[in-house]
Image: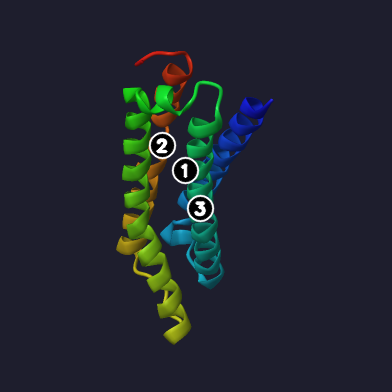
Amino acid sequence: MSEVVLAFIHLSAVLGWVVFASSQAALCRAEWMNAAVVRRLVRLDTILWVATAAVLLSGLARSAWGAKGAAWYWGNWLLHLKLTLFFITALLMIGPTRRIARWQARLAAGGSLPPEAEISGVRKLVMIETHLVALIPLAAVFLARGFGA
């Protein structure tokens, strides 16, 4: 039963990550940008980081307490591929987080919205993140079926 619960928590965290990253990408458009959207992006970004931590922690819990055991998971190159893709994605998230925080500060200081080029740049990074994350389940499916051991 613990394997089922761990898998559910991990899958829920991954789905949460995808939902909030997709929401961030959808809102990050120059034609939709206003003060309310900046505030929503700040909130989404915070939730996205919480979801990212939940994905990592639930995955680590699954490898430690899951049915296959830590030695099996950590000896498999597919887990290392998943973690590499995960950390690359997390590193890519830093840029948008910093820019969105600057947008909030700029808005609070004088009410100005970010320039269109900056909005497009953030959206592009978020889109790269979300597309990169789509590769992680491919490695996960193979890992779950015993490949790579």
Q: CA distance from mark 1 to mark 2?
A: 13 Å
The picture places residue 119, in percent across and down from the top left corner, at 37, 61
The picture places residue 103, in percent across and down from the top left corner, at 41, 72
Report the residue marked by disc 2: 133
Q: Is residue 105 above or below residue 63?
A: below
Front of the two marks 1 and 3 = 1
Q: Residue at x 55, y 63 (%)?
A: 43
Neighbour tally class for label 2: few under 14, some 14-19, many 20 plus, Cα within 10 Å:
many
Front of the two marks 1 and 2 = 1
* Residue nearest the observer in this picture, 110 or 71: 71
Marker disc for residue 70: none
Identify which amino acid the numbered label 2 is placed on. Answer: Val
The picture places residue 148, in percent across and down from the top left corner, at 34, 16
Identify which amino acid the numbered label 3 is placed on. Answer: Leu
* Residue nearest the observer in this picture, 136 or 109: 136
**On the picture, is 56 further left or further right than 43?**
left
Q: Residue at x 48, y 38 (%)?
A: 60
Q: Disc 3 or 2, which lies upstream in sequence?
A: 3
Report the residue marked by disc 3: 48
Q: Is residue 55 above or below residue 109?
A: above
Q: Residue at x 48, y 19 (%)?
A: 144
* Residue nearest the observer in this picture, 125 or 97: 97
Identify which amino acid the numbered label 1 is placed on. Answer: Leu
* Residue nearest the observer in this picture, 113 or 149: 149
**On the picture, is 88 further left or further right than 31?**
left
Report the residue marked by disc 1: 56
Q: CA distance from mark 3 to mark 2?
A: 13 Å
Q: Is residue 131 above or below residue 32?
A: above
Q: CA distance from mark 1 to mark 3?
A: 12 Å
User: Dividing the image into 4 quarters, which one contains the C terminus?
Assistant: top left
Q: Disc 1 or 3, which lies upstream in sequence?
A: 3
